Amino acid sequence: MFFGQNIKLLRKRRKLSQADVASSIDIPRSSYSGYENQVVQPPFVTLVKISEFFNLSIDKLIKYDLSTVSEFQISELEKGFDVDIKGDKLRILATTVDSDNTESVELIPHKAKAGYTVGYSDPEYISSLPIIKLPFLSENKKYRAFPISGDSMLPLVDGTIIIAEYIKDWNSISDGDNCVVVTSNDGLVLKRVFNRITDERALMLVSSNPVYKPYFVDVNDILEVWKQVAYIGTNDLFVASEDIHNKDIIVDLQKDIALIKKQIFD
């Protein structure tokens, strides 16, 4: 259990004293100090008060070591993303950050794809992945790079590298969005996604190649969804316009494509 160290971390993030928190939830400071130091456990009523004060579920406060979670992720948790049907059962997203606490872009090499559905939530697995630098991406979003296989999403061919943004709320997916959908049964697939969560609790996945038939995936089988914002093809780099801060950067990035591909396929 991580309850004591978690509430201490959250309190210090807000630059509050133990007395400040204790006063806010109407308990003695000595009692709150005991909870942080794990000398005593709070009664359920007090546990609920602490959960509401920090805007985190009791489950997150107890089960997860928040010291291993980035500032971005804690902020997202505090916004209340905690409802399974939205995909927010995955709010504790294993990730890596640089020395400035900025989210990194992890790259999933072909040889690591098979293990992703098992290791996607394992910080040790994620930290073992190579990192790529793409300066045109927003610092306020989480991205990951996925190589695709096969011919189901032509004109994107086998070996294309998809740069995708993490989708925390699956209800926000628009019909026709290209997304990397991670499922427990099929692993990583890039498809056009049609949102049928409200009516059927499912996403409909459609290939651009008509040889492949559309199919539905129940939300309970989905592990993650990542929306495509860019791709690195055989000789080029394409980036969705809303994610570019400086189009001149693309010229310099062309020189890095060969290195990125070497990281993926070696």
Image: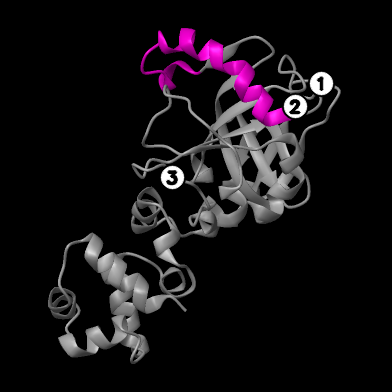
* Above or below, 254 relative to 58: above
Q: Earlier in the sequence, mark 1 or mark 3?
A: 3
Figure coloring: one colour
Residue at image mark 2: 207
For the question of whether residue 192 can be seen, the reply is no
Residue at image mark 1: 210
Question: Dot 1 lies on which element?
Answer: loop
Q: Which mark is residue 97?
A: 3
Within 10 angstroms of label 3, few (less than 14), some, or many (20 or more) residues?
some
| Left or right, residue 138 beside residue 228 | left
Within 10 angstroms of label 1, few (less than 14), some, or many (20 or more) residues?
few
| Residue 265 shown in magenta | yes
Question: Dot 2 lies on which element?
Answer: loop
Magenta span dominant secondary structure: helix
Out of 15 and 215, give the one closest to the viewer: 15
Q: Residue at x 79, y 20 (%)?
A: 209
Q: Percent x, y for residue 30? A: 19, 89
For the question of whether residue 263 can be seen, the reply is yes
Out of 177 and 131, give the one closest to the viewer: 131
Magenta stretch: give its range. 240-266
- Mark 2 residue type: Ser
